[in-house]
Amino acid sequence: MVDRSIGSRIFDWTNGTLLVLFSLITIVPFIHVIASSFASAAAYNQSSFLLFPTEFSLKAYSYIFTTNALPKSLGITIFITVFGTLICLAFTSLTAYSLSRRRMYFRKPIMFLIVFTIIFQGGLIPDYLIVKELGLLDSYWSLMLPRAIIPFYLIILINFFKNLPDEIEESAKMDGCGDLRMLLRIMIPLSMPALATLTLFYAVFQWNTYMHAILYINDTEKWPIQVLLRQIVMVSQAGFVEQGVVEGEQSIPPDTVKMAVITVATFPILMVYPFLQKHFAKGVLLGSVKG
């Protein structure tokens, strides 16, 4: 065993301590939200910052699930997240593969326009007018199609495709493989680590759809979970159930209701990462040439 110097040990101990503190700083708010959502009225009123409630209660969850508003809104968000992510991946993959090929005409002007949109954007009013003229208002397409490609993620995938060996494409062409077949059969399997990362980014982006849902969706029956969460928070702050939501003979503090809604809205997207983690841990060298 190699003897380590005192400075090296102090450095490792300091790094470990800082990482533990940083982890606590990031996880404590989640614990507080979950604990508050399960706290009874008496336990919540005892302390303004809960980490472990002295008395558990499921009344906040039973209250938010008494109507079909939250389950329906959650189902809408899941639908938008799944299909919106698939649409984003399809458009991003097709565009990135095309722009990564040097033989494509007008590749540089198109790349300039894409980078230009990162710096300068039209704004909300032009976006709204385009969605309106296309007849997408009050439809789920208005939440999926206008943001089908995010330029920053597109550039990431373009660079990944560029780093793949040219010999793979040349060998596929010699075997009579077309561009679309090459993308589906060769490039995409080799790009699973990058696509898994983009899948997570796009899924979080679609799940957190808020501003565009407020602009484009006027029908309350089609609201995603984030907009419904906003309404619950606004109603509570406006003085609704100021003394708590009355259920039976007990009252439910409005803050515990908000915490329960936040927990329900956040938990599903947190469950996506374990299914994508294997793509981060495996296949890092999939694009390399084996000698």
Image (cartoon, grey):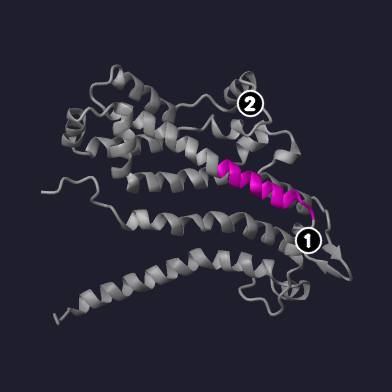
Label 2 Cα neighbours within 10 Å, binned few <14 / some 14-19 / many ≥20: some
Q: Is residue 216 magenta?
A: no
Foreground residue, 240 or 48? 240
Q: Is residue 77 magenta?
A: yes
The secondary element bearing badge 1 is classed as helix
Residue occupying image coordinates x 17% and y 79%: 4
Residue at the front extreme of this rendering:
175
Closer to the chain start, of discs 2 and 1, is 1
Residue occupying image coordinates x 32% and y 73%: 14
Residue occupying image coordinates x 32% and y 70%: 15
Is residue 151 at all visible to an observer of this figure? no
Range drawn in magenta = 67-81
Q: Which residue is mark 1?
A: 63
Q: Quadrant of the N terminus?
A: bottom left
Foreground residue, 90 or 24? 90
Q: Which residue is mark 2?
A: 136
Percent of width and height locating residue 76: 65, 44
Amino acid type assigned to the residue bearing label 2 in the image:
Leu
Amino acid type assigned to the residue bearing label 1 in the image:
Tyr
Is residue 122 at all visible to an observer of this figure? yes
Residue at the left extreme of this rendering:
291
Asked which quadrant contains residue 167, the reply is: top left
Is 215 left, or right, of 94 in this rendering? right
